[in-house]
Amino acid sequence: MAALTHMTIGIYSGSFNPVHKGHVALCDYLVRQGLVDQVWLIRSPLNPFKVESAQTLAPDADRAAMLRIAVRGHKGLRVSTIEDQLPKPNYSINTFHALEEQFPEHEFHLIIGADNWLAFDRWRAFEEFLTRYHLIVYPRPGYEMGEEEKLRLGPEAIRNVRFVDAPLYDISSTEIREDIAAGREPAMLNPRVFAYILEKKLYL
């Protein structure tokens, strides 16, 4: 029996409501820079920090389908629906426990924006996460990330955290949905994703 191949996998989880070019460009950048071997994009059924906006979500199956369309042809990017197997609302620590159990041959790194890093101590079991797993933190417009912000949880907390100088993508999914509702094609939306949205009559 052939040995399983070890890979470093970036986990990029989000609502992706809808997925846009900025999401894919960030993942491409991380793979291209050799920071991870692959990025798995996980469409979260329900973000525990966004429960109040659940009514704006497109159906789970449609958001997963749009992700698959968006990553088509992008080497190193794939879509995972592992969170569909977990209770709602789900927490990233549970996702990583499940990933570790199902794919013990891989090392998983959570990809988050600077806005989430600045609130990371509000996350479920954040101390366990920082001790047991790896994080990749990318810049977000309007969120300062100097040394004070990086060290906000203490120097020991960032042993498994990598801060990357990825390009900034100031794109709002809310504005994209508003453009679609107004009959406009958003420039930052993959045309194939837009065609799917029109076919399924999403966000109208």
Image (spheres, helix red, strand yellow):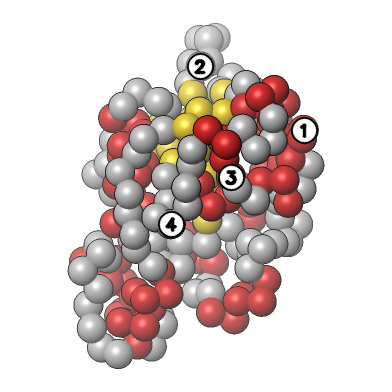
Please determine whether, in this image, residue 135 is positioned above or below residue 70. above
Q: Secondary structure at mark 3?
A: helix
Residue located at (57% from left, 23% from top): 107
Q: Secondary structure at mark 1?
A: helix
Along the polypeptide, which appears first: circle 1 or circle 4? Answer: 1
Q: Nearer the viewer, mark 4 or mark 3?
A: 4
Labelled pair 3, 2 in contact (Cβ < 8 Å): no
Q: Specify the amino acid type for callout 2.
A: His
Residue 142: which disc? 4
- Picture coordinates of residue 201 (x, y %)? 37, 84
- Read off the residue under disc 2: 6
- Read off the residue under disc 1: 128
Of 5 and 203, the residue lying toward us: 203
Along the polypeptide, which appears first: circle 1 or circle 3? Answer: 3
Q: Specify the amino acid type for callout 1.
A: Glu
Residue 117: which disc? 3
Q: Secondary structure at mark 2?
A: loop
Mark-to-mark CA distance, 4 and 3: 13 Å
Residue located at (74% from left, 40% from top): 126
In which quadrant of the rendered view does residue 76 lie?
Answer: top left
Of 121 and 36, the residue lying toward us: 121
Residue 96: which disc? none
Along the polypeptide, which appears first: circle 3 or circle 2? Answer: 2
Report whether 165 appears left or right of 134: left
